[in-house]
């Protein structure tokens, strides 16, 4: 049972918890609740302190680590201070979610439940909206990641299609990745995929080891090719930093799975520190080795043809392939509910999931730059889930009981920072994306 618990919490790479089993829901808003509530089917209650640490660390860790060196390149070395600040803020807002859970343990079991408890059905719908949008965009980022890295492993690949059209490079591998994940989206029971998606921590360790080897034995360190501070790149850096600490939507599920949930804040602190060390080490190594030439995915900078490069890329690509179906499953379920299609109907599930996969592949083929997409996700969606929603829900739930003025002031400051990052980061990332067309 304990291993099942590991699988349930090891899934997220975004602020979302991906369900393993789809259930019947009354409407679109209720379907959003299943993003977390349905994880209980694969969750063993009474998880130990150490097991929960592993679960939470796996939940927070994700593909954001690939963009850490690029984030530092955009903002300069001093932006790492903001990285530490973002980590501290996300830890604090995680404890706010814990306190919201304690307001009514019987009524609150998931992130959408917190929104409903605080603001009624409107709160649930707001959280549901951001969840579905983020799920879709993260699914797109998975395909972009696959296309970029496979193109590095097999450069110059192309296929001649009917009508004289040639599919090549990144677009070719995005199409192939979509073809690979498509059958997994037709599965009724996605639990088996959780085992493959639990290799995230291994992939992070392999990536760090590859960077160390590249710096020591191959490329060396370019201390003179780095910048101290770049104000123009800070919005992009902040957006990417927030991506690294997302995972708040799965916190209620992990909190409920603990044998003693009074220790959740300690578990969250340990997991945050472990992830910060991993992210920080990758950022420093990647930026010291490649300087301002570092790409949005540091794996693309690793020397071509080297064995450790191939191992790092392959291990990095396993997670997105395994998690893709887990991401689009709630989207498929929501569409089925929206159009009142028969629950559990195989033809409907296959048709809808196929359309979702094709649409994400088409959009992924037009996304010019992985870093800009991740920055948009972090600035707009991750900030909402990790900063704005927890703070607003906490203030609403505990306003009547009274909150210390110093804490109200701190939360107000965090909200202002969140709004600033959301506005400036979203504007900057959208401007960058549009400017590349």
Image: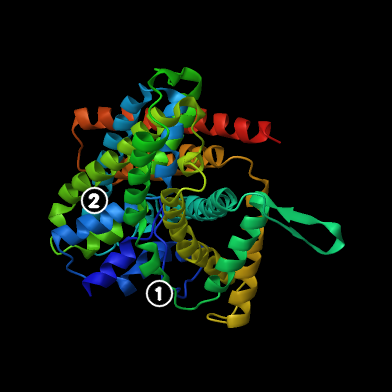
Residue 395 x, y percent position in the rendering: 30, 40
The reply, left or right, for residue 241 in relation to residue 374 is left
The reply, left or right, for residue 156 in relation to residue 308 is right
Indicate which label's residue lies in the foreground, 1 or 2. 1
Assign the N terminus to one quadrant of the image: bottom left
Assign the C terminus to one quadrant of the image: top right
Residue 274 x, y percent position in the rendering: 24, 45
Residue 256 x, y percent position in the rendering: 23, 62
Q: Looking at the image, which residue is at 46% across and 57% down?
A: 314
The reply, left or right, for residue 147 in relation to residue 47 is right
Residue 200 x, y percent position in the rendering: 36, 56
Q: Looking at the image, which residue is at 47% across and 37% down?
A: 379
Numbered circle sitting on residue 282? none
* Residue 26 visible in the current orientation: yes
Q: Are marks 1 and 2 in contact (CB under 8 Å)?
A: no
Q: Which residue is mark 2?
A: 98
- Residue closer to the observer: 51 or 344: 51
Q: Looking at the image, which residue is at 35% across and 41% down?
A: 213
How packed is label 2: few (under 14 Cα within 10 Å), some, or many (20 or more)?
A: many
Disc 1 from disc 2: Cα separation: 29 Å
For the image, the number of numbered tags is: 2
* Residue 420 visible in the current orientation: no
**Up-down relation of residue 344 to residue 248 (above or below):** below
- Residue closer to the observer: 70 or 311: 311
**Up-down relation of residue 383 to residue 78 (above or below):** below
């Amino acid at each position: 049972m304990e291993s099942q618990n590991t699988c349930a919490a090891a899934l997220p790479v975004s602020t979302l918890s991906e369900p393993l089993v789809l259930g019947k829901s009354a409407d679109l808003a209720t379907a959003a609740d299943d993003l977390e509530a349905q994880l209980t089917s694969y969750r063993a209650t009474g998880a130990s302190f150490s097991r929960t640490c592993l679960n939470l660390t796996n939940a927070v860790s994700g593909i954001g680590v690939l963009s850490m060196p690029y984030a530092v390149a955009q903002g300069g070395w001093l932006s790492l201070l903001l990285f530490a600040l973002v980590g501290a803020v996300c830890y604090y807002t995680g404890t706010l979610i814990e306190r919201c859970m304690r307001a009514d343990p019987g009524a609150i079991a998931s992130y959408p439940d917190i929104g409903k408890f605080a603001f009624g059905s409107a709160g649930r719908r707001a959280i549901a909206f951001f969840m579905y949008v983020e799920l879709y965009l993260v699914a797109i980022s998975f395909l972009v990641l696959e296309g970029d890295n496979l193109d590095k492993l097999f450069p110059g690949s192309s296929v001649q299609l009917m009508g004289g059209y040639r599919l090549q490079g990144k677009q070719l591998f995005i199409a192939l990745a979509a073809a690979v994940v498509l059958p997994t989206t037709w599965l009724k029971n996605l639990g088996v995929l959780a085992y493959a998606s639990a290799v995230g921590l291994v992939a992070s360790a392999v990536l760090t080891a590859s960077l160390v080897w590249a710096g020591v034995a191959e490329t060396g360190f370019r201390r003179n090719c780095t910048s101290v501070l770049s104000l123009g790149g800070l919005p992009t850096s902040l957006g990417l930093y927030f991506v690294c600490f997302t995972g708040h939507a799965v916190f209620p599920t992990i909190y409920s799975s603990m044998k003693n949930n009074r220790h959740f804040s300690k578990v969250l602190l340990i997991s945050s520190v472990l992830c910060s060390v991993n992210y920080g080490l990758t950022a420093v190594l990647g930026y010291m080795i490649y300087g301002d030439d570092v790409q949005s995915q540091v794996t693309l900078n690793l020397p071509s043809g080297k064995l450790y490069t191939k191992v790092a890329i392959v291990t990095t690509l396993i997670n997105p392939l395994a998690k893709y179906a887990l991401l689009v499953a709630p989207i498929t379920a929501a569409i089925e509910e929206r159009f009142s299609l028969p629950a559990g109907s195989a033809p409907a599930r296959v048709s809808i999931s196929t359309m979702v996969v094709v649409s994400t592949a088409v959009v992924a083929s037009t996304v010019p730059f992985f870093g800009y997409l991740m920055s948009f996700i972090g600035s707009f969606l991750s900030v909402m889930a990790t900063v704005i929603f927890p703070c607003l829900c906490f203030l609403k739930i505990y306003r009547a009981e009274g909150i210390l003025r110093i804490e109200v002031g701190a939360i107000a400051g965090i909200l202002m920072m969140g709004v600033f990052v959301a506005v400036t980061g979203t504007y900057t990332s959208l401007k960058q994306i549009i400017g590349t067309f």
